[in-house]
Amino acid sequence: MSVKNLRIVGAWLGLVTAVACGPEPTATESTWMLGVWSGAQPGVMIESCGVPRLEIRKDGVLIKGSGEETTCLSNPEPGASHEYTWERRGDDEIDAHSVIYPDSGYRIERGEDCNQILVTRFEGDVEISMMPYHRGKVCAALICPPDVGNCVQFSTRWCEGEAPPA
């Protein structure tokens, strides 16, 4: 394939991505990572009331944790959150470093589509784990019948009733 054809294909793919994921003004202004992300999709059965959550803000702050309340719809309580600072590693990746422990944090990459990111936890140069996160606030609701004593079955769903806009 000629260089000219490769440029045409590259431009076409960039247009498809912009249409699918929204506008990307420039590499230094990309906003694909901003917003609230949850570690579970709605409609999934889980055995705890916790749904991991991230909020990535434009001001360079990343908040890990649910913050104001737990992600359990049946028993909201004050929850812990941890602050990180983030910086770009190209147009498709950011690194978030702990304010307290700067050698630990998360690498965040674009996922399969506009509503998914891949979050890799690291300590120093060692990758510890990777997990997909999904755009929006997902909470857990107890689904056991009222007469069952030690039931720990939860179902995830949108906290605010509907999916966020893409």
Image (spheres, rainbow, N blue to C red):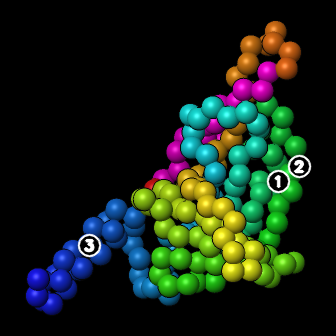
Relative depth, front residue between 23 and 128? 128
Q: Residue furthest front?
A: 126
Relative depth, front residue between 159 and 17? 17
Does the magenta portion include 160?
yes
Q: Residue at x 63, y 31 (%)?
A: 45
Q: What kind of residue is marked 3?
A: Leu
Q: What kind of residue is marked 1?
A: Glu
Stretch of the chain drawn in magenta? 151-165
Q: CA distance from mark 1 to mark 2?
A: 6 Å
The residue at which mark 3 appears reads as 13
Q: CA distance from mark 2 to mark 3?
A: 44 Å
Q: CA distance from mark 1 to mark 3?
A: 40 Å
Circle count: 3
How crowded is the residue under tag 2: few (<14 C-alpha within 10 Å), some, or many (20+)? few
Q: Give yes or no for contact between labels 1 and 2 (Cβ–Cβ under 8 Å).
A: yes
Label 3: which secondary element: helix
Does the magenta portion include 16?
no
- Tell which circle, 2 or 3, labels the residue nearer the N-terminal end: 3
Query: In this view of the protein, can residue 85 be seen by the observer?
Result: no
Label 1: which secondary element: loop
Please identify the quadrant where the N terminus is shown. bottom left
The residue at which mark 1 appears reads as 68
**Please, is residue 157 above or below residue 40 in the view?**
above
Q: Residue furthest bottom?
A: 3
Q: Residue at x 34, y 70 (%)?
A: 18
Lateral position of residue 98 relative to residue 86, left or right? right
